[in-house]
Image (cartoon, rainbow, N blue to C red):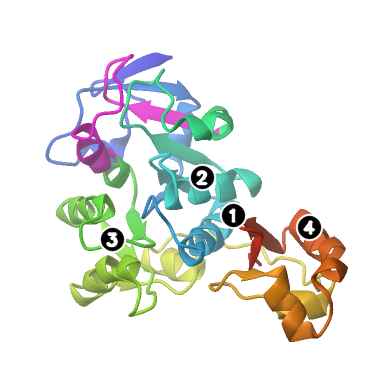
Amino acid sequence: ETVITILDDDYPPLLREIADPPLALHFRGDLQLLRMPSVAIVGSRRASPYAINAARVLAAPLATAGCAIVSGLALGVDTAAHEAAVEAGGATIAVLGTGIDVLYPRSNRKLYKRVGLLLTELAPGTPPMAMNFPIRNRIISGITLGTVVVEATIRSGSLITARMAAEQNREVFAVPGSIFSAGSEGTHRLIQYGAKLVHDAQDVLDELHMNLTIPASPHEPPPHPEVYAALDFEDPRNAEGIALKLQCTPASLAAALLDLELTGWVRALPGARYVRTR
């Protein structure tokens, strides 16, 4: 763990431009990642399956195109964005609301070790305190060219990040959702106020005029296409529901669902429910 100050050459140049840049940053990892074009992906801690999927579907292609994915290592959307970037073999940066040596949340122990660069302005040993997270958000927006809000209630901390991004003259993007979901209210308000609606990763690259190309993924059909077709990106379904649709027994689906999960086509959720991920 080391420190860089605002006077150092390695200090993030975009961060110098904001109204209240931190005078020093504690870091762990590869500082060269700060030289890459980067995008923040943030959202709800209690993210819906739709939001987790959306974060992953945006983060992975942006990362493979050569864009660093920045987030806050929180549960939910942040975790999904970091994980998708790492799994795609891309770069990801986490800005902490704690000391550099304090792991929070504890469930992200593996991810904490896999993130390419950890940053914080807080002194080592600083515990997770509610007041530190909104302050940390100005760094997330400050080191990036734009911030994508995936899911946010009207009181979400992600809206603070979006407001700071706008104040810093950075682009703000929002992913639309269902009008019946409380988690879409914040993102829909952002779109009303002028945030760019995001349908896919290319929208982000185009708006930020990034000269990056998303590599074409090989078109491969999913295994067990009939089982895959019975699943949905938003609405988690259990084996009983799938079996009813396919007119078979839940037991006969076990091997197919496991195969689809292991090959990355579906994700298992608590309560033995499944959603599509590709």
Q: Is residue 223 visible?
A: no
Is 60 above or below relative to 74?
below
Residue 16 to residue 220: above or below: above
Q: Residues in magenta?
A: 115-139
Residue 185 visible in rendering: yes
- Give the residue drawn at x 81%, y 85%: 247
User: Alpha-carbon distance for marks 4 and 1?
Assistant: 19 Å
Residue 117 forms part of the magenta stretch: yes
Q: Which residue was labeled with disc 1?
A: 270
- Contact between marks 3 and 1 (CB within 8 A): the answer is no
- Name the front one of labels 4 and 3: 4
Q: Where does label 3 land, which residue?
A: 171
Q: What residue would you read off at disc 2?
A: 82
Q: What secondary structure is found at the residue carrying circle 4?
A: loop
Closer to the chain start, of discs 4 and 2, is 2
Q: Amino acid at mark 2?
A: His
Seen in the image, is 117 located left or right of residue 179?
Answer: right
Label 2 crowd (10 A; few <14 / some 14-19 / many >=20): many
Task: Using the numbered discs, state the Cα–Cα distance from disc 2 to disc 1 in whole angstroms.
Answer: 21 Å
